Image (cartoon, grey):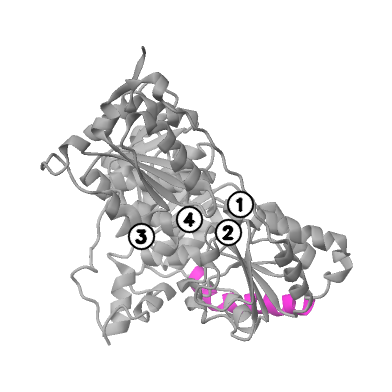
Amino acid sequence: MATITGGQIAAQALLEKQVEYIFTLSGGHITPIYQYLEEEEIVLFDTRHEQAAVFMAEAWGKLTRKPGVAMVTAGPGFTNALTGIASAFFSNTPLVLIAGCVGLDHKEKLDLQDMFQEPVISPMVKKTLVCQKAERAQEFVDMAFRIATSGRPGPVYLEFPVDVLNSAVEEETVKKLQTTVASKPVDRKGAKQTIDMIRNSSKPVVIAGTGIWQAEAEADLVTFIEKSSVPVFTSLSGRGTIPDTHPLCFESSLAIRPGPAFAAFIETDLIIVLGTRISLYYMFGDILNPAAKMIQVDIEPEEIGRNRAVDLPVVSDLKAFLTECNEIMDAGDPASEFKDKFSGWITTLSEADTAGKAPSTADWESTNTPIHPMRLAREIDDFMDREDDIVVADGGDTTTWMGMTRTMKQAGHYLDYGIFGSLAVGLPYANAAKLRYPEKRVLLLTGDGSVGFNFMEFENSIRKGLPIVVVISNDLGWGMIRHSQEIRIGHAIEAGTFIGKVDYHKMVEAIGGKGFFVEKPEQIRPALEEAFASGKICCINVMTDPTTVSPGSMALANVGAYKA
């Protein structure tokens, strides 16, 4: 009678899920799975640190809306993966983390890399799964993928003790389960009430977030906005689900971005929140007009009502909800009913957009040296002007400057760390984006502090043939912390905020890439042109003004992070 090992069953289950890449760093406790994937279609994409592997899996999940898969070994391999998992949990990204662990027979014997992993990671994931029988490995893989994508997406932890992976069982005892859940619940009454509340409003706004992207509802959102004539702001992975260039889109919902968001949220009388959370980005709801009515639509019931009373809570898949709303409007005559209903409000927002951007124009066009980081962000935005260009941002102030500047033309083509705010995502995200879209231009703008976390992923880019362009905004240290300390306590504490001038471009050249050193604003564009023309992994080291203070630094100084 034929036998099969737990590792072989797990490998076959991953193949059945049509996984393309597993982002990983090898180790003894996961070798029993590795050995059965060595000659298979799945690519084991090895990184130089487990954190980078999980960040790549997170980026893959963000880009594809399917579970990214990471695999790490026991103990330190597992603990190195935790930051990436926490990030995926906050960003609601589908991800499956597979980890090996000490064999069941060796628990509490002080074996190599022994630790209780499941209790540590449990608060950071949708669910933890520990497979203790080899014949059930396929079931557990199936469960992990199903849970990662059902309802509100998120990471799932799947653990295999090494002796379970090595155990041989009779093949006929292996139960094969395969279930795909495609539930799209919709609240039809809520959709009708939404249209009624729009009819009764005079200054409505929509905030469209990650839920729109995850539900593949981009086209439905555009149709909804055009039929209702309601102005829209976008956030997080919802950026680009309706292009910033659309006449009814007023770009980012972040009030710190130059534009009309702050004015809109103060004056609005109806806020329609579609698939995003009322978080720090909205000062926990305090920035939103308290007299305005609020509609919140989310796939996760427990999310509705966080930080703000909601007048119309709607539990629904966003695509199904918008489809229902559009059909309700089609049953009437939206072309005449809503065509000019909010024209005065749109004019007000357009004027606020112009006024809101005016104070930043001098920084975007600055000719100063050291270079103003807003000028650097604007040069990148102007250069990366193709609809399918991908921009990644990493770093404290650096991500803030890019977020204040980037024009979104297509969904899924801008990546940053989102609400969790973890530095170090830049190189792994950019590598994942280039792997996913080898034909597209991929640029990472990162701070000089954040680039150090996973710096050896430059070598990975070179070894794997992923020609990304990395621009470093080099302000000599940890700018956001430095400036927030100056605001809060009157001075920066040099230890922990100052790095100094580092020739990162030469370090990249030393391992086989191409480097550029930029000190003047007029040198930025030529460096970008030469970098992309080279077809190589490039590092453009740009010396930026260490005295500029971003709105992010100001916010950090005022969130109670320090004693008065």
Categorize mark 2 by other alpha carbons within 10 Å: few (<14), some (14-19), many (20+).
Answer: many
Q: Secondary structure at mark 2?
A: loop
| Nearer-the-camera pick, 103 or 389 | 103
| Quadrant in which the C terminus appears | bottom left
Tell me the residue that label 4 is attached to.
92
Query: Where does label 2 land, which residue?
Result: 299
The tag earlier along the polypeptide, 3 or 1, is: 1
Q: CA distance from mark 3 to mark 4?
A: 15 Å
Point out the stretch of residues depicted in magenta: 343-364
In the image: residue 43, left or right of residue 190:
left
User: Is the Cβ of the residue at disc 1 closer than 8 Å to that at disc 2?
Assistant: yes
Q: Is residue 340 left or right of residue 142?
A: right
Q: CA distance from mark 4 to mark 2?
A: 11 Å
| Left or right placement of residue 22 versus residue 160 in this view | right
Which residue is denoted by mark 1 in the rendering? 215
Q: Position of residue 361 (x, y in %)?
A: 54, 73
| Quarter containing the N terminus | top left
Element at label 1: loop
Q: Nearer the viewer, mark 4 or mark 2?
A: 2
Tell whether position 346 is magenta.
yes
> Which residue sits furthest top?
1
Badge 1: few (under 14), some or many (20 or more) residues near its Cα, within 10 Å?
some
